[in-house]
Amino acid sequence: MIEGVHSFRKHEERLAREQRKLSRKKKGSNNRKKQKREIAKLHHTISNVRSDFLHK
């Protein structure tokens, strides 16, 4: 298997899990804000993985 595909799938699964966690948080809470930051970081990581794969 191509490593880019494997790591991308791993990150996608983690993103889904983190988004489910977010959906259980109360709107406006500090924990929700922290979770949204975590998801934003994960989106950035996925973007970097895709970009890296393109340039290899």
Image: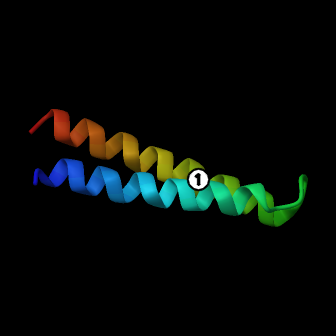
Task: Look at the image and tell me in which quarter the C terminus lies.
Answer: top left
Q: Amino acid at mark 1?
A: Ile
Query: Foreground residue, 20 or 32?
Result: 20
* Picture residue at 68% right of the left edge, 53% below the top: 36
Q: Relative to residue 15, is residue 37 drawn left or right?
A: right
Residue neighbourhood size for the residue with mark 1, other residues' Cα within 10 Å, grouped as few (<14), some (14–19), many (≥20): many
* Picture residue at 56% right of the left edge, 61% below the top: 17
* Picture residue at 52% right of the left edge, 52% below the top: 41
Q: Position of residue 9 (x, y in %)?
A: 33, 53
Examine the rendered structure and indicate whether residue 54 appears above or below residue 38: above
Q: Quadrant of residue 24?
A: bottom right
Q: Quadrant of residue 26?
A: bottom right
Residue under numbered circle 1: 39
Q: Position of residue 3 (x, y in %)?
A: 15, 54
Examine the rendered structure and indicate whether residue 54 appears above or below residue 45: above
Q: Position of residue 18 (x, y in %)?
A: 59, 60
* Picture residue at 42% right of the left edge, 51% below the top: 12
Q: SS class of the residue under badge 1?
A: helix
